Image: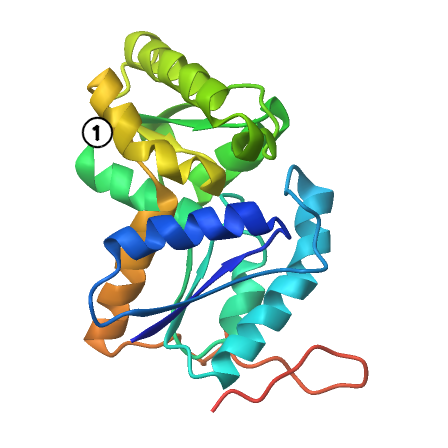
Amino acid sequence: MQLHIVNPNSSTGMTEQIRRVAARVAAPGTTLDVTCGASAPRSIEGYTDEALAVPAMLAEIRAAELRGADAHVVACFDDPGIDAAREIANGPVIGICEAAIKTALMLSSRFSVITTLPRSIPIIEDLADVYGADRKCRRVRAIDLPVLALETNLAEAARLLAAEVNIARREDQAEAIVLGCAGMADLCQRLTSETGVLVIDGVTTAVKFAEAIVGTGYKTSKLGAYAAPLEKAGGFAQEVA
């Protein structure tokens, strides 16, 4: 299968990290096509960044469809533009937040999420509700480190994350931790080893979800909400066969 992974921000360093992490878990028959939104913000930290990133992300998905993509992974924990992406894609579109949260729901009875900046907490709390986590998501925490610092100071990020994992285990009674940023993906196994807590990364889980769904032969329903966008002057439309 051909799996397209789009990093909605324009950071090439983060895009390469996402490629590296995905390659570690991709099945032998999976070809990875990893892109980023070249005209998007360098990081996505809030609703405005999300809105600015979505047009470039949709363009990348449309181009990947023309290259024969069987599925798409949106590698930003805010899951920006997921519904619009499902309108223009034939195959499944998997957001890393949804994939990670649903994995946590299957592997633990209580979990917490650790993200970068405090401003992302309400965004992720709302997503956890949308994805059915309810009270099983005990808390969304932040290490108060900007997304781009994950590229330049990974050692400090690892230290802060390990400390927060231990606090979540003690204070939240969290049985698992979900990493709330694609830029944290490289630290997943290290944090599990250091803390003894199951740490879940959305990039790896989304890759495996996409492979599984494609393997079943299922595609995105085109009846109703995810039908191809209507053709109109100035609109972002694509015929999806």
Answer whether residue 176 is visible to the viewer in this image: no
| Residue 8 vertical placement versus 200 (above, below) | below
- Relative to residue 12, is residue 159 drawn left or right? left
State the residue at coordinates (20%, 41%): 106
Q: Mark 1 points at which residue?
A: 109
Q: Viewed as shown, does residue 188 lie left or right of 119?
A: left
Along the line of sight, the residue nearer the viewer: 155 or 209: 155
Q: Is residue 126 above or below residue 227?
A: above
Label 1: how many residues lie within 10 Å, few (<14), some (14-19) or many (20+)? some
The percent position of residue 111, horizontal first and vertical second, equals 30, 27
For the view shown, which residue lies furthest in the right direction?
Answer: 234
Seen in the picture, residue 117 relative to 240 is either above or below; the reply is above
Residue 63 screen position, x and y as percent: 56, 78
146 to the left or right of 94: right
Count of labels in the image: 1
**Relative image position of residue 175 (x, y in whole percent):** 23, 23
Q: Disc 1 marks which amino acid?
A: Ser
Question: Which quadrant is the N terminus positioned in?
Answer: bottom left
Residue at 43 percent across and 50 percent down: it is 18
Residue visible at 48% across and 76% down?
89
Q: Give the percent coordinates (x, y) of residue 218.
A: 28, 76
For the point 67% across and 55% down, the residue is: 53
